[in-house]
Amino acid sequence: MAPRNSNRLPIKSLSLSFSIFCILPISLFFLFFLSHQRSSPLPSPSLSLAHKLSPNQNKSSIKVYIADLPRSLNYGLLDTYWSIKSDSRIGSEIDNELRSDFSKTTNPKYLPYPENPIIKQYSAEYWILGDLMTPADLRVNSFAERVFNSDEADVIFVPFFATLSAEIQLIVEKGVFRKKVVGNGDYMRQKEMLDLIKASDAWKRSGGRDHVFVVTDPVAMWHFKAELAPAILLVVDFGGWYKVDSKASNDSSSEMIQHTQVSLLKDVIVPYTHLLPRLHLSENQDRKTLVYFKGAKHRHRGGLVREKLWDLMVNEPDVVMEEGFPNATGREQSIKGMRSSEFCLHPAGDTPTSCRLFDAILSLCIPVIVSDDIELPFEGMVDYSDFSAFVSVNNALQPNWLVQYLRSISKRQRDTFRHNMAQIQHIFEYDSGQLGGIGPIPPDGAVNYIWKKVHQKLPMIKEAIIREKRKPQGVFVPRRCHCT
């Protein structure tokens, strides 16, 4: 028998050697990987979050071309307004003081929008144009991308300060405001603007369907609202579309512009500019009053409900109903009243909405909305039922019903409403804090949210333009955009 080889390793030893041989490279790889990870700093959580929230990170946008209009139809109107010697209307005291200051300044570069609350609440036109006029390198937060060729644009923005034009006429000569005469400066400006816009190639290509007009004030574009029907309208609600207020006492009035001219399919509901300062949740204090309302008792049309509610609630305990005017004294009273009340009543006025709703939100006072026909800004992005109480007019006008209902809402639910409200206050703020409204805007403010809503309308607008092109010459198809 051949002798056994003493140098031969046992099978178990061979297996062990093979295992070590296989595991060693893997171990060295993980050792190197971990060493590399330790030598590299971990990303800061705050930096990581900031990177995710960067406005340029995969940001979509809407391409906007500013229609070519003379300065006299926008910023020139600010020159005109501030050159007026005095305005005797309620709420003009602060602007009269500012006029005195401006008169001492030679050709101020930037003029502010009026502080008179009657005008200021409709200042969307000022802030939207200011954002578009800001130099490109300062517009990193803007959802709207300005382009300088109308062929490249998704929409055409018409830079006409319609509110300011109308309000100037009401100051200088109210008696001709509703007349189509040369002496009516507002009428002449509206006509000049429309003549220029309708003569443009951009309007002729689309029939105006991709043009954006800001028409927030009920008296803005008084004489030519019907001419704007094809366009995208930025409005605070649909209630201001009446020709003659005194004759529009009911829906059957022949003087009312029919709502086929405004529609949620193409138009965008925008917020009023709030008039009261923002209250942060950390500043909130105990609220002693149940319900607060300040405003005019007597209104027209849908606002008749306000007068009835007033009579029902004025003598209820823990309810404050105050007649008030939009002047400095009224402002201070509103700040105090809204910040010390659980609920702020929001009945319809001359129109279904008012600035009061947004003042309540900025004051963390839970809105009680009594307006059956109301349309609200940014719905689909915001759920108002998360922080508001909606009440039908029928229920609200039942004796004792509304107060009992509000008392039944628990403190826990009220706190939840207020917490939710604090999360969305910023989307109703226009003011960028920039002189002349020109400069960087907050990424989550009202201007960007407005353009995002316009962006949502683009597929339908583009479809309407294409359908119009294939219509045979001489064929008339009535507009049917009354759907909501």
Image (spheres, rainbow, N blue to C red):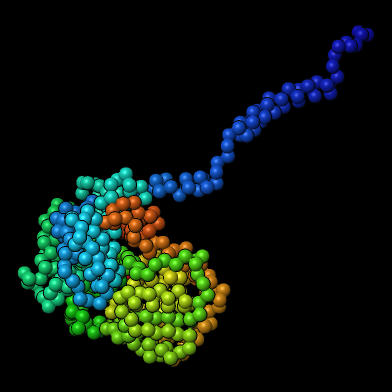
Residue sitting nearer the eye, 275 or 248: 275
For residue 400, side relative to residue 107 (left or right):
right
Residue shown at the point (30%, 76%) measured from the top left:
326
The correct choice, above or below, for 399 with respect to 72 in the image is below
Residue shown at the point (23%, 63%) measured from the top left:
101
Residue at the extreme right: 1
The correct choice, above or below, for 17 with respect to 392 in the image is above
Residue shown at the point (34%, 51%) measured from the top left:
440
- Residue 336 occupies quadrant: bottom left
Residue sitting nearer the eye, 205 or 234: 234
Residue 218 location, x and y as percent? Answer: 24, 73
Q: How many marks?
A: 0
The answer to whether residue 204 is visible is no
For residue 376, side relative to residue 76 (left or right):
right
Q: Which of the image's four quarters has the N terminus?
A: top right
The correct choice, above or below, for 98 with respect to 302 in the image is above
Residue 110 location, x and y as percent? Answer: 24, 55
- Residue 369 occupies quadrant: bottom left
